Image (cartoon, helix red, strand yellow):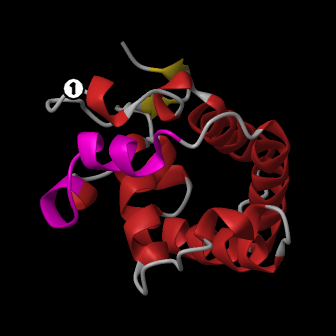
Amino acid sequence: MQMETVYEAAGGSEGLLRLAAAWHELVMADPLVSHAFHGGAKPDHTERLAAYWGEALGGPPAYTATYGDEASVERLHSGNGEHDEMNRRAIECFDEALTNAGLTDPRLSQVLHDYFAWATVTPMYHHRADDILDDAQIPRWSWDGLQG
């Protein structure tokens, strides 16, 4: 019997869409983190985010099949310099969004927190767009953390 993926445990696409919507609402209301969206968020930001998280957490390739690839995500988030306080607040909003989205199982919420915290502070978003490989792949995350 195959173990349930983090994606499945989070409720699949519906669960991650609830999480993305809850996080987006909190972020947009936060004076520090909302600055990241000063140019405005795309109207379908929560759907894009849920699809990306889903693919990263063991779900279907909904993000890469519909919206783009990892290189485009990294280029979008690169070159903004250090923003440790914004990162800290974004992670706090995520933790609150877990509760708001009903994802309160302790093991699941810890794995999701660890993934989001890693993805938020990972150096891949700190380098220059010129350094991003065109064939970059969405990092995969499981119950055991980052996969090879």
Task: Estimate the x, y position of residue 48 in percent, counting from the top left.
Answer: 38, 68
Q: Is residue 138 left or right of residue 96?
A: left
The foreground one among 36 and 148 is 36
Magenta: main secondary structure equals helix
* Residue interval drawn in magenta: 64-79
Task: Locate residue 29: give its quadrant.
Answer: bottom right
Name the residue nearer the viewer: 60 or 82: 82
Query: Is residue 76 among the parts visible in the rendering?
Result: yes
In what quadrant of the picture does the N terminus appear? Answer: top left
Camera-nearest residue between 85 and 7: 85
Q: Is residue 28 magenta?
A: no
Q: What amino acid is found at the position of numbered circle 1 in the picture?
A: Leu
Q: Residue at x 76, y 62 (%)?
A: 33
Name which residue lies at 35% across and 32% down: 2
Secondary structure found at label 1: loop
For the point 80% across and 60% down, the residue is: 93
Establish if 59 lies above or below 78. Answer: below
Image height check: is 71 above or below 92?
Answer: above
Residue matched to label 1: 133
Instruction: Residue 8 in the image: state x and y as whole percent.
Output: 45, 53
60 over 145 or under it: above or below: below
Residue positioned most to the bottom: 43
The residue most toward the top is 148
